[in-house]
Image: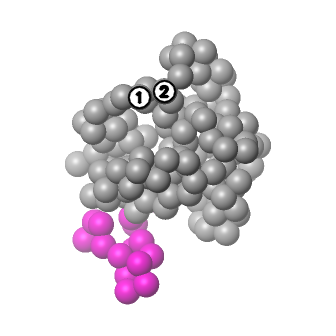
Amino acid sequence: MAGMQNAIGAPMAGRKRVLVADDDVAVCSLLKLVLKSIAHVTTVQDAESALAVLEKEPPFDAIISDFMLPGINGLEFVERLRAEPLSSRTPILMISGHDRHAVDERARALGVEAFLHKPFTLAQLRQTIGGLLGPTAAA
């Protein structure tokens, strides 16, 4: 059954997995809540923690990154992701509250597939991540 986790909280086989990197704990909580029906969500507050998770865990089905992260910013994070064989093709959604055109152009050049600009609606979030995860996730 979709959305089920085993006794230790790990996602069950076949469940889509999403990694969220955002320094705003409230945004992480919101994303986890909204996406729980379509994916198991792992959250971290910075890119370095996200890279550490990616080294230890099986590949994720999608990655959501804020543009402004402490330390390594969102664009540098995407550059590192694209340089790694296991994440080089993972769909990425970038969230930003900054100048739409400047962020979009730079991020798209690095291989970001989707963007959400703050403020965004829950429907936009579900539709965007559902599109990245494929038809079974959008249901």
Amino acid at dot 2: Gly
> For residue 14, which quarter of the picture?
bottom left
Q: Position of residue 62 (x, y in %)?
A: 50, 48
Q: Nearer the viewer, residue 43 or 82?
A: 43
Q: Which residues are magenta?
A: 1-17
Precedes in sequence: disc 1 or disc 2: 2
Looking at the image, residue 44 lies above or below residue 120: below
Circles 1 and 2, Cβ within 8 Å, touching? The answer is yes
Residue 74, image quadrant: top right
Q: Which residue is mark 1?
A: 118
Residue on which the image places disc 2: 97
What is the residue that sits farthest to the top in this orientation? Answer: 101
Dominant SS in magenta: loop
Quadrant in which the N terminus appears? bottom left
Q: What residue sits 30% from the left and 66% below the top?
A: 3
| Quadrant of the rendered image containing residue 6 | bottom left
> Is there any visible trace of residue 25 in the rendered image?
yes
Residue type highlighted by circle 1 = Lys
Of residues 83 and 97, which is closer to you in this image?
A: 97
Mark 1 and mark 2: Cα distance apart in space: 5 Å
Q: Is residue 127 magenta?
A: no
Q: Nearer the viewer, residue 106 or 82?
A: 106
> Is residue 8 magenta-colored?
yes
Rendered location of residue 26, percent (x, y)? 41, 50
Examine the rendered structure and indicate whether residue 104 appears above or below residue 15: above
* Residue under the point 27% across and 58% down: 37
Tell how many labels: 2
Q: Nearer the viewer, residue 29 or 36?
A: 29
